[in-house]
Image (cartoon, rainbow, N blue to C red):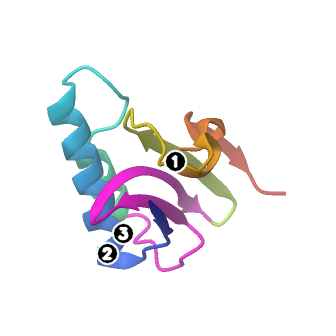
Amino acid sequence: MRAVRPTGQEYLALVTELLQRRRLADPVAGLWEAADVQWWYTRDPHPYNADAVVWVDGDAPVTAAVFTRWSAGRYGCTSSATRLSPPHGISSTTAAPSSLLHRSRWRST
């Protein structure tokens, strides 16, 4: 498992695939749909690699932590995870950071 910091269309493709796979695995799990990130992309096309981290296993996205820039001083943090056991030798916080498995919003100071 490795972490990538995608931008632009690569970001959109990875998080869309992740959320579609999650919905197929469990139709009632999770808060966000792939359509949500598609819509948010019109507001924030993720031009910076600091705005998203996607953990991938092979080529498949497993979990993600995403910051959305709603305006110059307003950000949102969203994450999504599947229930996978981390590979041997990798802590669960490296593989799927539980501290990011929530949604919050804040204003910058």
Q: Quadrant for residue 106, please give it.
A: top right
Check whether the beta carbons of the residues at disc 2 and disc 3 lie within 8 A of each other: yes
Identified at 69% across, 60% down, the residue is 73
Residue 92 in the magenta stretch? The answer is no
* In magenta stretch: residue 66: yes
The boundaries of the magenta stretch are 43-71
Q: Which mark is residue 40?
A: none
- Can you say whether 100 is above or below 109 in the image? above
Residue 1: give x, y in percent of width and height: 44, 59
Disc 2 marks which amino acid?
Glu
For the residues marked 2 and 3, what is the alpha-carbon distance in whole angstroms? 4 Å
- Give the quadrant of the C terminus: bottom right
| Circle number at residue 10 | 2
Secondary structure under the numbered disc 2 in the rendered image = helix
Tell me if 84 is positioned left or right of 92 in this view.
left
Looking at the rendered structure, the kind of residue marked 3 is Tyr
